[in-house]
């Protein structure tokens, strides 16, 4: 495999061999001037995973040393994730690296290079083979890595099985490998980081940890108690009222309301009941869409859009005084703030 491919898939054993061949070592990665870009990119891998559940691609058109830096950035990122040792971050990072894998495997398949895809699959313990009809994998591997995807087209009975192997179209094949890498990273991380290495990474951990805590607080439904529509921001109250008054919601409105309700802890069936009053209500179609957004069928749990996105889609309805506060940048932040204010007022009333 060439060095650009190894840098694209830095978890491959060939990437480790390449780093050894080029004399890369941990000491240089941690404080060598030549590895500064690898450290910056490693940090970027973690921060982008946290913010966007993705690791953006970088150009690999440079020298072999540039590609080595990309490989070493993966090592650096894994050390950061291990040191922070937080389940939310680990899962998010595993998802982001595997989403990147899926995307890049898709590009490679489009270019007609099945051999590279098969090599990557085998390193992820998927015994892939290429046939005239396309790519296949043992049905046991398919079941192992696709079980979290609940939609009907992923059921084994809806696939073509021959001699214990499942034929899969390219995108589905890559999607299974995404899950395989995600599972592997979630199993591998965190690993033990020696204290002398932890000391050297001391300075970069706190800002990432702070951002992580802020995000967890912002999106967590914990402490919100039972979902109370009175505390919803105006945008969600309007979307909910429109649904209950039998008005059709736009796609973006339906997505925003569904993900918001799910983020507050409602399950797919509870959300379905709310949509049942829409004039275009179609139970199976609605349940399919809801399950996709809640992650039951897609494996990806979506977070409701931020205020800026709501505004872009024209669904930030009648923002009130609280919305105007600088701190309110997300409907979930509004809900949390309203919950806090309500509790504070109730406490003040009882102490009077
Ligand atoms: S400003 Fe934000 S929180 Fe307030 S209604 Fe609009 S989208 Fe919702």
Image (tube, rainbow, N blue to C red):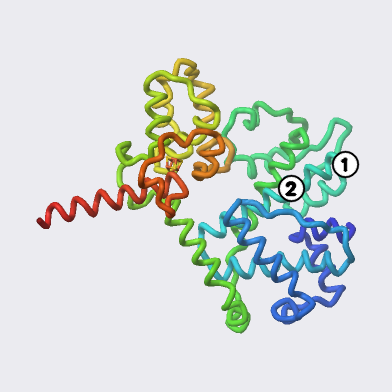
Viewer-proximal residue among 56 and 308: 308
Disc 1 packing (10 Å; few <14; some 14–19; many ≥20): few
- In primary-sequence order, the first of circles 2 and 1 is 1
Residue placed furthest toward the top? 279
Relative image position of residue 2 (x, y in whole percent):
90, 58
Mark 1 lies on a secondary structure that is loop
Q: Which residue is mark 1?
A: 111
| Picture residue at 53% right of the left edge, 44% below the top | 308
Which quadrant of the rendered structure holds the C terminus? Answer: bottom left
In the picture, measured across the screen, residue 161 lies left or right of residue 295, that is right
Disc 2 packing (10 Å; few <14; some 14–19; many ≥20): many
Relative image position of residue 112 (x, y in whole percent):
88, 40
Is residue 105 shown above or below 252?
Answer: below
Relative image position of residue 47 (x, y in whole percent):
61, 61
Q: Is residue 273 visible?
A: no
Viewer-proximal residue among 201 and 307: 307
On the image, which quarter does residue 176 sit in?
A: top right
Relative image position of residue 118 (x, y in whole percent):
82, 47
Viewer-proximal residue among 130 and 62: 62
On the image, which quarter does residue 173 sit in?
A: top right
Q: Which mark is residue 168?
A: none
Mark in front: 2 vs 1: 1
Q: Quote the CA–CA distance across marks 2 and 1.
A: 21 Å
| Picture residue at 78% right of the left edge, 42% below the top | 106
Q: Which residue is mark 2?
A: 126
- Quadrant of ligand 1 in image: top left
Viewer-proximal residue among 161 and 171: 171
Is residue 7 shown above or below 332?
Answer: below
| Picture residue at 57% right of the left edge, 34% below the top | 150
Is residue 47 shown above or below 21?
Answer: above
| Picture residue at 51% right of the left edge, 57% below the top | 88
Q: Is residue 163 visible?
A: yes
């Amino acid at each position: 495999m060439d060095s650009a491919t190894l840098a694209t898939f830095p978890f491959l054993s060939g990437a480790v061999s390449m780093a050894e061949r080029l004399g890369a070592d941990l000491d240089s990665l941690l404080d060598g001037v030549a590895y500064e870009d690898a450290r910056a990119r490693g940090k970027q891998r973690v921060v982008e995973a946290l913010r966007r559940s993705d690791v953006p691609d970088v150009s690999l058109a440079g020298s072999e040393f540039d590609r080595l830096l990309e490989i070493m950035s993966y090592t650096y990122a894994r050390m950061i994730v291990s040191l922070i040792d937080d389940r939310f971050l680990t899962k998010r990072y595993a998802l982001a690296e595997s989403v990147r894998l899926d995307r890049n495997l898709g590009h490679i398949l489009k270019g007609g290079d099945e051999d590279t895809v098969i090599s990557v699959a085998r390193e992820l313990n998927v015994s892939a083979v290429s046939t005239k009809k396309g790519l296949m994998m043992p049905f046991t591997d398919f079941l192992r890595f696709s079980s979290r995807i609940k939609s009907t087209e992923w059921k084994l009975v809806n696939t073509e099985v021959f001699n214990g192997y499942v034929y899969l179209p390219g995108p589905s094949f890559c999607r299974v490998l995404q899950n395989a890498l995600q599972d592997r990273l979630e199993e591998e991380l965190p690993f033990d980081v020696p204290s002398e290495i932890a000391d050297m990474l001391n300075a970069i951990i706190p800002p990432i940890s702070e951002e992580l805590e802020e995000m967890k607080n912002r999106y967590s439904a914990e402490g919100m108690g039972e979902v109370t529509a009175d505390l919803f921001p105006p945008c969600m109250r309007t979307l909910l009222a429109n649904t209950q008054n039998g008005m059709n919601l736009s796609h973006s409105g339906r997505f925003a309301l569904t993900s918001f309700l799910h983020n507050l802890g409602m399950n797919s069936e509870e959300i379905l009941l709310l949509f049942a009053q829409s004039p275009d209500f179609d139970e199976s179609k609605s349940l399919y869409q809801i399950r996709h957004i809640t992650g039951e069928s897609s494996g990806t749990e979506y977070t409701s859009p931020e205020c800026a996105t709501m505004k872009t889609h024209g669904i930030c309805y009648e923002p009130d005084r609280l919305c105007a506060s600088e701190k309110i940048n997300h409907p979930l932040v509004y809900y949390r703030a309203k919950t806090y204010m309500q509790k504070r007022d109730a406490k003040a009333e009882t102490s009077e």
